[in-house]
Amino acid sequence: MKDALFAVMQTASDWAVPVLFLIIAAAAMFKRVRVYEEFIEGAKEGFNVGVRIIPYVVAILCAIAIFRASGALDAVVSALSPVLSPLSIPPEILPMAIIRPMSGSGALGVLSEGLTAHGPDSLIGNMMSVLMGSTETTFYVLAVYFGSVAVRRTRHTLAACLIGDVTGILAAIYISNFFFK
C-alpha cells in the first residue's frame, strides 16, 4: 500500500511541471496569446521589481544572519528538544522549521547542512526535504511583495501565512513519519 502510494506520488511529481507547461501553452494558443513576447515583457518588469526590492531582501538576510550568528537559533533548538522528541519530531529539523519562513536561501543552507550531517535517505534528511517543499518563505514574501507595492499595513496576512506554515510543518512531519520511518 505504502509503496504503491509512493510510486503514484513519484509519477505525479515527475509529470507535474511538464504537464503544467503544456496546459499553459495550450491555453495561450487557444486564446491566441503570443507566449514568447509576453514572457519577454514579464521578464523586463521582473527586473525592475528586483531592483526595487533589494533593500527588503538585504534586511531579511541580515536579520537571519544575526539570528544564527548570535546563537539564538541554537538556544531555541536546545530549549525545545525535550518537548519534541517524545512527539516523534526530531530536534534536528527545528532549524529548518524556524529559518524556512524567513528565507529560502537560508533554509537551503540549513537543508544542505542537514543532508550532509544525516544523509539524504535518513528520516531527518527526508523530513527536512519535505518540510522545505511544504512551507513558504513567509517573511521574505511579505517583505518583497508588500514592499514592492509599498503596503505598510498587512492586516491578517502574517497570521494567515504563519498558520499555513505551521500546518505545512506538521503535515511534513506526519507524512515523513508515515512514509520514511
Image (tube, rainbow, N blue to C red):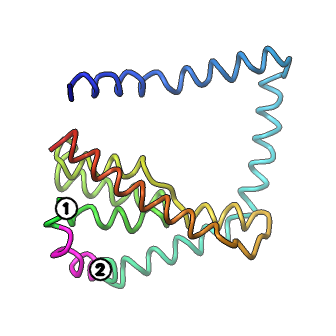
Magenta span dominant secondary structure: helix
Q: Amino acid at mark 2?
A: Val
Q: Quadrant of the N terminus?
A: top left
Q: What residue sits 36% from the left and 85% below the top? A: 70
Quarter residue 50 falls in: bottom right
**Secondary element at tag 1:** loop
Q: Quadrant of the C terminus?
A: top left
The stretch drawn in magenta includes residue 75? yes
- Spatial CA distance of label 2 from label 1 is 14 Å
Q: Nearer the viewer, residue 68 or 123?
A: 123
Q: Is residue 56 above or below residue 50?
A: below
Left or right: residue 73 versus residue 2 is right
Which mark, residue 147? Answer: none
Q: Nearer the viewer, residue 151 or 113?
A: 151
Mark 2 = which residue?
A: 76
Q: Amino acid at mark 1?
A: Pro
Q: What residue sits 42% from the left and 49% below the top? A: 134
- Label located before the other in sequence (2 or 1): 2
Q: Is residue 22 above or below residue 103?
A: above
Mark 1 = which residue?
A: 90
**Secondary element at tag 2:** helix
**Residue 19: where, in percent of width, then height?**
56, 20
- Magenta stretch, residue numbers: 74-84
Quarter residue 54 falls in: bottom right
**Residue 165: where, in percent of width, then height?**
46, 60
**Residue 65: where, in percent of width, then height?**
44, 75
Left or right: residue 75 versus residue 86 is right
**Residue 136: where, in percent of width, then height?**
50, 55
Q: Is residue 133 above or below residue 103?
A: above
Q: What residue sits 29% from the left and 22% below the top? A: 7
Q: What residue sits 41% from the left and 79% below the top? A: 67
